[in-house]
């Protein structure tokens, strides 16, 4: 599977997605705008280190983000390079596992999000579904 992850096309797609996702710089201070140039200079070295099992992800930058009512939540921000590799792995895994997910599963899937999950839940409620019926809403894990 690592060969699939490290295919040039997959890595290019991953870099495009990381840039599109934007996000803050990690502990090394590199921004997503700097990723293409960084990969141009370091791609082969990074790939070799992954293949040789010597790649070591950088530390995660811990940032507290406000959650309302004076509360905060700790958010871990990986470096852009680590996000690039994580995205490359995710893309390969998604193609292998996406077909096994139920259509009503919304967590961390392409074209699925919290808003769509809530919308579907409201549709079930408005359609009159109740506990004990096939489309029961069993678990909704929202961010408060």
Image (cartoon, rainbow, N blue to C red):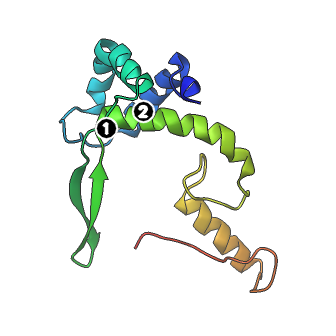
Are the two marked residues, 2 and 1, in contact with CB atoms closer than 8 angstroms?
yes
**Residue at x 29% of width, y 53% of height:** 76
Q: Which quarter shows the N terminus?
A: top right
Q: Position of residue 54 (x, y in %)?
A: 34, 28
Crowding at dot 2, Cα within 10 Å, few <14 / some 14-19 / many 20+, comes out as many
Quick check: 113 left or right of 51?
right
Q: Nearer the viewer, residue 49 or 12?
A: 49
Q: Position of residue 142 (x, y in %)?
A: 48, 70
**Residue at x 81% of width, y 75% of height:** 134
Question: Element under label 1?
Answer: loop
Q: Estimate the spatial distance between the alpha carbons at disc 2 and disc 1, rounded to whole Å.
A: 9 Å
**Residue at x 28% of width, y 20% of height:** 38
Task: State the image quarter where residue 69 is shown.
Answer: bottom left
Establish if 32 lies above or below 116. above
Q: Which mark is residue 133?
A: none
Q: Which residue lies most toward the right here?
A: 134
Question: Element under label 2?
Answer: helix
Establish if 122 lies above or below 74. below
Crowding at dot 1, Cα within 10 Å, few <14 / some 14-19 / many 20+, comes out as few
Quick check: 104 left or right of 112?
right
Q: Which is closer to the viewer, label 2 or label 1? A: 1
Q: Indicate which disc, 2 or 1, sits on the residue closer to the N terminus.
A: 1
Total numbered circles? 2
Q: Which quarter shows the C terminus?
A: bottom left
**Residue at x 70% of width, y 71% of height:** 123
Q: Mark 2 points at which residue?
A: 85
Q: Which residue lies most toward the bottom here?
A: 131
Q: Position of residue 116 (x, y in %)?
A: 60, 60
Q: Mark 1 points at which residue?
A: 57
Q: Nearer the viewer, residue 57 or 19?
A: 57
């Amino acid at each position: 599977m690592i060969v699939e992850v490290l295919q040039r096309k997959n890595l290019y797609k991953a870099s495009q997605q990381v840039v599109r996702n934007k996000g803050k710089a990690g502990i090394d201070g590199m921004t997503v705008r700097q990723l293409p140039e960084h990969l141009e200079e370091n791609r082969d070295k990074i790939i070799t280190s992954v293949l040789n099992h010597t790649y070591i992800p950088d530390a995660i930058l811990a940032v507290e983000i406000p959650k309302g009512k004076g509360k905060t939540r700790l958010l871990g921000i990986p470096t852009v390079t680590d996000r690039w590799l994580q995205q490359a792995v995710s893309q390969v895994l998604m193609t292998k596992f996406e077909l096994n997910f139920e259509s009503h599963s919304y967590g961390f899937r392409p074209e699925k999000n919290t808003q769509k999950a809530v919308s579907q839940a409201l549709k079930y409620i408005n359609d009159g579904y109740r506990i004990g019926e096939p489309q029961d809403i069993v678990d909704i894990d929202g961010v408060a």
